[in-house]
Amino acid sequence: MNDTPSPPRKQRPPPKEAFIDAIEHVSPGLIRISCSGPELAQFAQPKPAGHIKLFFPPEGVVWPSKDPASEIPRPPSRTYTPRRFDPAQNRLEIEFVRHGQGLASSWAERARIGERVLIGGPGGGYPVPEDISDIVIIADESAIPGAGMVLEALPHGCRAKVICEIANRSEERALSPSVASTPVWLHRDNTSLAPSALLEEYVRSMPTPASDAYFWVACEAAAMRRIRDLLITKHGAERTRLHTRGYWKFGETNHPDHDYGAD
Ligand SMILES: Cc1cc2nc3c(=O)[nH]c(=O)nc-3n(C[C@H](O)[C@H](O)[C@H](O)COP(=O)(O)OP(=O)(O)OC[C@H]3O[C@@H](n4cnc5c(N)ncnc54)[C@H](O)[C@@H]3O)c2cc1C
């Protein structure tokens, strides 16, 4: 996948426009951006760990055009988690991992109050099973916003074990302001390990979870596949209890991972 503009597709709904009203450097590796605006009155309440698309038109290009005959191509987009939406204020919070050179990550580093944001969605999300009483949540930095949403959607009394891989101790933070959790934090600490390798290692050696446990896994795409295999072959997890997502792929731009396993 690359950033070649795709031809205009008129059947898709136009993005919603909002404007940045707060920027918070939550930790050295994470920027939280809030945006609001009247068009977010049309934004549906996102499902747990749902997604949005953020569009990045080139400098000077006005997109979408008001002219229905316009052939301006759809600009590059990236997938993010609508971490918190407040319908009373038409306000949306998004958390960006600062991972280096990416279009979206670099945009977040340069973002300014008042800047326009173009948002598609929300869509997708984790349908929390009705009979859930145990869940294992496995996430890298990019999936911590989604993991927080899943925690907030669990029924009262559901036990959640949370395992997160992060760069180092300074990235530890509460996953949710309203739901307490004590994640197992796995620190890369400048090692040259492959992304999400610590998650994989942890899953390989952890005690087998309860047989009726569900699993929510989101991290680097190749590691996600290995983790899914371990859950099935080593821990005997049923595929129907797994919700696994590759959130990005090492060395690939805007990787659209459509391998959802069997769920
Ligand atoms: C459903 C869903 C929800 C997501 N939610 C979030 C979210 O809330 N916050 C968030 O930060 N990300 C989230 N992601 C991941 C995000 O879409 C990708 O990280 C995306 O590639 C970032 O775009 P970019 O323009 O910054 O980098 P790209 O231009 O896509 O990639 C540039 C380079 O950076 C590498 N790269 C991309 N992402 C990462 C990363 N996280 N760590 C290290 N290297 C990376 C790529 O392999 C590539 O080599 C989500 C993904 C999905 C599928």
Image (cartoon, helix red, strand yellow):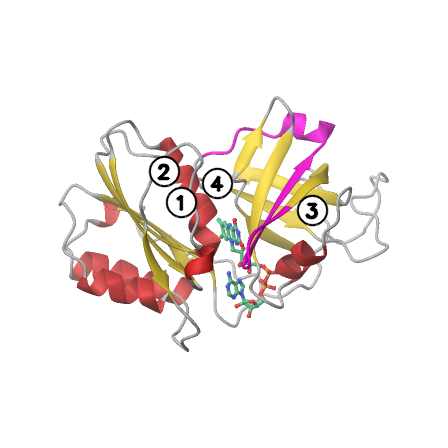
Q: Residues within 10 Å of mark 3 (few under 14, many from 20)?
A: few
Q: In this image, 153 relative to 227: left or right? A: right
Q: Which residues are magenta?
A: 24-47
Can you give x and y, in whole percent of width and height, for residue 19 in the image? 74, 39
Q: Residues within 10 Å of mark 2 (few under 14, many from 20)?
A: many
Q: Residues within 10 Å of mark 4 (few under 14, many from 20)?
A: many
For the residue marked with disc 1, what is the amino acid? Ala
Element at label 4: loop
Residue type at the position of mark 2: Leu
Name the residue beneath numbered marker 3: 9
Q: Nearer the viewer, mark 2 or mark 4?
A: 2
Q: Nearer the viewer, residue 36 or 258?
A: 36
Which tag, 2 or 3, sits closer to the chain's start? Answer: 3
Q: CA distance from mark 3 to mark 4?
A: 23 Å
Res 238 label: none
Q: Amino acid at mark 4?
A: Gly
Residue 187 image point, x, y percent = 37, 64
- Which quarter is ligand 1 in? bottom right
Ligand 1 within 8 Å of disc 4? The answer is yes
Q: Determine the CA span between mark 3 and mark 1.
A: 32 Å
Say whether residue 197 is left or right of residue 113. left
Label 2 vs 4, first from the N-terminus: 4
> How far across and down, in percent of the image, does residue 186 sit?
34, 61
Do callouts 3 and 4 mark residues in contact (Cβ within 8 Å)?
A: no
| Label 4 vs 1, first from the N-terminus | 4
Q: Residue at x 86, y 55 (%)?
A: 60
The residue depicted at 30 percent of the width and 28 percent of the height is 155
Residue pointed to by mark 4: 50
- Type of residue at label 3? Arg
Q: Which mark is residue 151?
A: 2
